[in-house]
Image: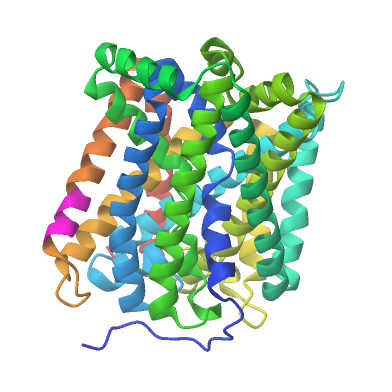
């Protein structure tokens, strides 16, 4: 059955390697380094298990995105899927558009700030907050310019950054495993001990929190107008990227647990891997980790700007954002890219990035659940498995409950702040939908 989307001309600039790089660029950013500390604090040596479970949740979420992406072939992705599946729910489509775009903007701010923290981490200016903010804003400007100038150039740069960072981080983690104070037998024994003390609830909470480290695979669909053979490359790119992300995250976690004392991982969090590599390999090891982290955040910034700006342009074309954001030069949504860069820079200036991170994490988990529900509705059209789609709904619902429970128990003020953000964005979405004369 023919779908409802209106296909725009495709320039087919991006091949499979570029698409995998875009997805990995969006996923392997600063998230894994921060999550490592939280996970070790909660479940110790069981961290690799939780990371794998989190990856399985991401794969379940990806199933519906892949099916909907191949069926609709629309770069509006999440927003367009919901709009086409529920054509009468105009306000709901507007809300999803606003939430998804600001979820991407929040992660963009986080990636840029993490980039700046690593760049100056080994200098005397490491604690200079305004220097951090200035560098973060500057790197957003750099990648906004690259995205505006050339799609093909962005793809090649993304390839280089993503695959280089994977090699560096994998190399460092393997070296830590080989030279760490813990051997494999002792590590497995420690896992058994931790399994006796940890609850299944704790493992599921950590797995749900880990979802933010897998957020980004959706960016592949935003490139549908610039990709070759979308029917084949959408599923290949997304599933390959998730599998590679799981592998690299597990290697990083095991390397850290083999070589770095748990208390150091918990206290240092994102800098723990650099410190551990420094203890084993000296300054060379620490510098390699810093380079890997800088490449990780750089590719995440580039991939997020690329995909999310195209989704913002689609939402604007429908009238739920200012029409100015829909304007393009060829296929490049320049105004959307500039706007995303500007808002992200503003968020960096005002601070509160931990709150913004949690907002992004919960938002993408909830939106992924809505996509699974949408796919279930039209599962015959998308040729989806009823069992897998139901498993997606159950897994993502469980993940939502787990992360909200974690927020409620550990930081209820932050939970209410996130609810307030949802309220503000919902009001904005309502005002724009009302402009169009819809209820």
Rendered-image quadrant of the C terminus: bottom left
Q: Height in image: 85 above or below 367?
A: below
44 in relation to 13, above or below = above
Q: Of helix, strand and loop, which mostly describes the magenta segment?
A: helix
**Residue pictured at 60% horizontal, 58% vertical:** 303
Question: Residue 333 sits in which quadrant?
Answer: bottom right
Q: Position of residue 373 (x, y in %)?
A: 20, 57
Along the line of sight, the residue nearer the viewer: 404 or 294: 294
| Residue positioned 33% across, 53% down in the render | 59
> In x, y percent, where is residue 136?
73, 41
Q: Nearer the viewer, residue 204 or 381?
A: 204
Q: Nearer the viewer, residue 377 or 95?
A: 377
Residue 228: percent from left, percent from top: 51, 82
**388 falls in the magenta region:** yes
Give the quadrant of residue 25. bottom right
Is residue 87 at least partly visible in the picture? Answer: no
Left or right of 76 in this view: 334: right
Residue 29 vertical position relative to residue 124 in the rendered view, above or below: below
What color scheme is it? rainbow
Left/right placement of residue 364 relative to residue 195 reads: right
- Residue 7 falls inside the magenta stretch: no
Residue 93 position in % (x across, y down): 33, 62
Visible residue check, residue 176: yes
Residue bounds of the magenta highlight = 387-393
**Along the horizontal axis of the image, is 162 left or right of 255?**
right
Residue beneath the point at 44% across and 45% down = 246
Q: Nearer the viewer, residue 291 or 406?
A: 291
Which quadrant: the N terminus? bottom left
């Amino acid at each position: 059955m023919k779908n409802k989307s209106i296909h725009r001309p495709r320039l087919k600039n991006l091949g499979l390697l570029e698409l995998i790089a875009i997805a990995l660029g969006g996923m392997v950013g600063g998230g894994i380094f921060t999550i490592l500390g939280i996970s070790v604090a909660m479940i110790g040596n069981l961290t690799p298990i939780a990371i794998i479970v989190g990856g399985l949740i991401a794969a379940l979420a990806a199933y519906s995105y892949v099916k909907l992406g191949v069926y609709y072939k629309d770069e509006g992705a999440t927003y367009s899927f919901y709009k086409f599946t529920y054509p009468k729910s105009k306000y709901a489509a507007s809300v999803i558009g606003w939430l998804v775009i600001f979820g991407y903007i929040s992660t963009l701010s986080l990636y840029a700030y993490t980039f700046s923290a690593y760049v100056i981490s080994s200098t005397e200016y490491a604690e200079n907050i305004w220097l951090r903010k200035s560098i973060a804003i500057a790197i957003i400007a750099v990648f906004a310019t690259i995205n505006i100038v050339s799609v093909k150039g962005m793809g090649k740069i993304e390839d280089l950054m993503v695959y280089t960072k994977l090699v560096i981080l994998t190399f460092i983690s393997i070296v830590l495993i080989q030279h760490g104070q813990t051997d494999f037998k002792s590590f497995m024994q420690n896992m058994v001990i931790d399994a006796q003390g940890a609850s299944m609830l704790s493992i599921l909470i950590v797995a749900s929190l880990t979802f933010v480290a897998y957020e980004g695979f959706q960016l592949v669909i935003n490139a549908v107008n610039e990709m070759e053979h979308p029917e084949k490359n959408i599923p290949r790119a997304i599933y390959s990227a998730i599998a590679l992300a799981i592998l690299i995250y597990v290697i990083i976690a095991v390397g850290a647990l083999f070589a770095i004392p748990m208390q150091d991982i918990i206290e240092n969090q994102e800098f723990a891997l650099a410190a551990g590599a420094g203890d084993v390999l000296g300054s060379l090891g620490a510098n390699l980790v810093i380079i890997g982290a800088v490449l990780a955040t750089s590719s995440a910034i580039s991939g997020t700007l690329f995909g999310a700006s195209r989704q913002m342009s689609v939402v604007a074309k429908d009238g739920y954002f200012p029409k100015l954001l829909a304007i393009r030069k060829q296929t490049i949504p320049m105004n959307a890219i500039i706007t995303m860069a500007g808002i992200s820079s503003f968020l960096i200036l005002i601070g509160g990035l931990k709150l913004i991170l949690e907002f992004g994490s919960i938002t993408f988990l909830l939106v992924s659940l809505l996509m699974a529900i949408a796919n279930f509705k039209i599962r015959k059209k998308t040729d989806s498995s009823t069992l897998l789609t139901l498993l997606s709904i159950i897994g993502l619902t469980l993940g939502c409950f787990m992360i909200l429970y974690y927020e409620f128990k550990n930081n209820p003020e932050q939970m209410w702040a996130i609810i307030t953000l949802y309220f503000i964005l919902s009001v904005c979405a309502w005002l724009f939908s009302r402009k169009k004369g819809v209820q």
